[in-house]
Image (cartoon, rainbow, N blue to C red):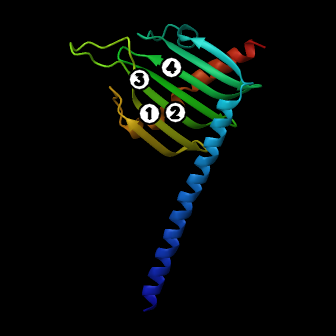
Amino acid sequence: MKAQYVSLLLFALAYNARSYSQYDKDSIIKNIKEVYQQVNNDKALHVITLDEQEFLGDEVSLDGGAGLEGYFKNDTLCKMVVEFGLSYAMRKYDYYFNKGRVIFIYETEKDYPEKKDGMLDYENLKLAFEGRYYYDNGKLIRSLFKGKKRAEGNTPAEYVKDLPADFKKYIKTLQTHAKSKK
């Protein structure tokens, strides 16, 4: 009889710990949303805009070009937007930072639709994919996907894990340009 109560008590504790963890994640995500909305509404941010040549150099030439923007409050990078034009789509990544760490990444892919003759319609873009990635202390705590990318080699788990690291050199480039503008 006692063993049943102990098992029930352990189950209740585990259930409450899991519920608290979910509550904690929801609270963190709520705070992240507040931060990125504040950044998006802050009209006083200083914007640094770089074209493909300025941030990629000669290492890559993309069909649809590329762009990089950094949004700064004083010397602090609050947001970074990276766009890549591919032969079949436009990909955009909005990175949001708090205290120097990425807290949220919003990714979109807009594809050029296929015409009846099998060619791509380069006059139009159609939203095909949205990804939302929430981070706490450098750790991914939630990812949400809507739609599908046209071409992707990595599995979503591998791909999402690499997103914060992929653009560290772009952050350095923006910070260097911001310092040189002073």
Alpha carbon distance from label 2 to label 4: 12 Å
What amino acid does circle 4 point to? Glu
Q: Position of residue 102 (x, y in %)?
A: 60, 36
Which numbered disc, 1 or 2, marks the residue that appears first in the sequence? 2
Residue furthest to the left: 117
Which numbered disc, 1 or 3, marks the residue that appears first in the sequence? 3
Badge number at residue 130:
1
Which numbered disc, 1 or 4, marks the residue that appears first in the sequence? 4
Please name the residue shown 58% across and 21% down the image.
170
Alpha carbon distance from label 3 to label 2: 13 Å
Circle 3 or circle 4, nearest the eye: 3
Alpha carbon distance from label 3 to label 4: 11 Å
Does dot 1 land on a helix, a strand or a loop?
strand
Task: Answer whether labels 3 and 2 touch (C-beta < 8 Å).
Answer: no
Q: Quadrant of residue 53?
A: top right
Say left or right for 157 vs 34.
left
Please name the residue shown 61% across and 53% down the image.
27
* Residue at numbered disc 2: 106
- Category of crowding for the residue at label 2, using alpha-carbon neighbours closer than 10 angstroms: few (below 14), some (14–19), many (at least 20): some
In the image, residue 126 sits, relative to residue 137, either above or below, namely: above
